[in-house]
Image (spheres, rainbow, N blue to C red):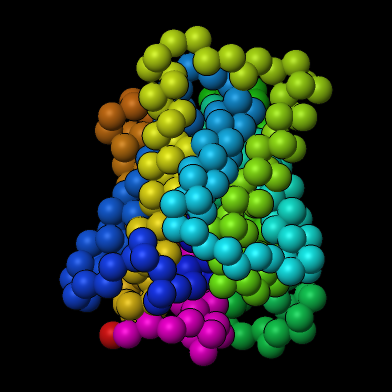
Amino acid sequence: MLVNWEWCVYESNSPMIKIGSKYSNLIQLVVGGLLFSLSAILVSVVSIGGGGAAFYRMFFAALSFFIILILTGNRVSLSPRDYIYSILTGSVLAFNYIVWHKSIHIVGPGIGSILTNTQIFFMVAVGVILFKERITIPKVLAVLIGFLGIVALTNNETKISDVGLDGILYGLGSGAAYSIAILFLKNITSTNKFLSMFVVCSTASLFIYVYTSVSNESIAINNVETLVYLLAYGILVQVFGWYLIASSVPHLSLFTVGLVLLVEPLITFLIDITLLGKEVVLIQIFGAILTLFAMYIGLNKEKKNEGNNINYRE
């Protein structure tokens, strides 16, 4: 899943973040992106339901951020407004992860990852509808190419499975939810990103727990292997991956960042095909490339609009 630029605000006085050369920052970004590409893979192989995987991702992440807050001794609090937006973000992310995991279990981690990254297209739509942004040729091209790409990518899924359409809609729904979460997240102004992430993850884990209880979905961890996968999902991906990306983004060009992070769903798609045995037809590969290209157009446009709000160095 692509990382929102607003999460990647660098705190120069943080004792946890050590700045190196441009190349070390690039390595951090690549490693963080690779960790994020493991998200859907872990969900697909772990022996627990989608709701359970979502709960433990957020629960272990919240626990990790709490420990980080204690170790760093950061006493900067959140304003009531920041608390509200952090809670709103967490509640929407809960829905996002629930439906995304459903999508992964139906259409696979590769297609599921690409579908959830359609949040870029939803952000374009939100900008035009709510914020009256100007309709430009790149925006129109991104949406049209993206639509064609998604049709080509997913068409075969509806033919080989009775629930294929459900998996597609779940994936697109997660993309829409993630775009809403980004809107809420942008309103959090506190410099204490660890505290805001703790509130976000705690809220999400609470909402997901309620969902699993109401839907009678078990979140029991039945073996050590499942526990290891879930710890990796919550700590390596959600915390360590986020930290590497957040600490490297402000020190690289936006073009570099966007290109590296856009490779994430492509890597997941390739792993799904080569290692997990996902069967695809040629038109789906073409659709994946087309969709990712459309994402690049939309992402490049979004970065130009927000470039003034992000500190980075070439």
Q: Is residue 71 above or below residue 108?
A: below
Q: Which quarter of the image is occupied by the C terminus?
A: bottom left
Q: Quadrant of residue 180?
A: bottom right
Q: Is residue 150 above or below residue 268?
A: below
Q: Quadrant of residue 25?
A: bottom left
Q: In the image, what residue occupies the spot 48% across and 17% down?
A: 47
Q: Is residue 217 above or below residue 209?
A: above
* In-front residue for pair 176/11: 11
Q: Would residue 179 be seen by someone viewing this image from the given angle?
A: no
Whole-percent x and y of residue 139? 59, 77
Point out the stretch of residues depicted in magenta: 295-313
Q: In the image, what residue occupies the spot 74% across and 54% down?
A: 87
**As drawn, is 58 to the left or to the right of 215?**
left
Whole-percent x and y of residue 108? 48, 32
Q: In the image, what residue occupies the spot 65% across and 43% down?
A: 202
Q: Is residue 125 magenta?
A: no
Whole-percent x and y of residue 199? 66, 51
- Seen as rendered, the residue at the extreme top is 222
* In-front residue for pair 284/7: 7
* In-front residue for pair 42/18: 18
Q: Is residue 301 above or below residue 278?
A: below
* In-front residue for pair 29/305: 29
Q: In the image, what residue occupies the spot 74% across and 69% down?
A: 79
| Numbered label tally | 0
Q: Is residue 296 magenta?
A: yes
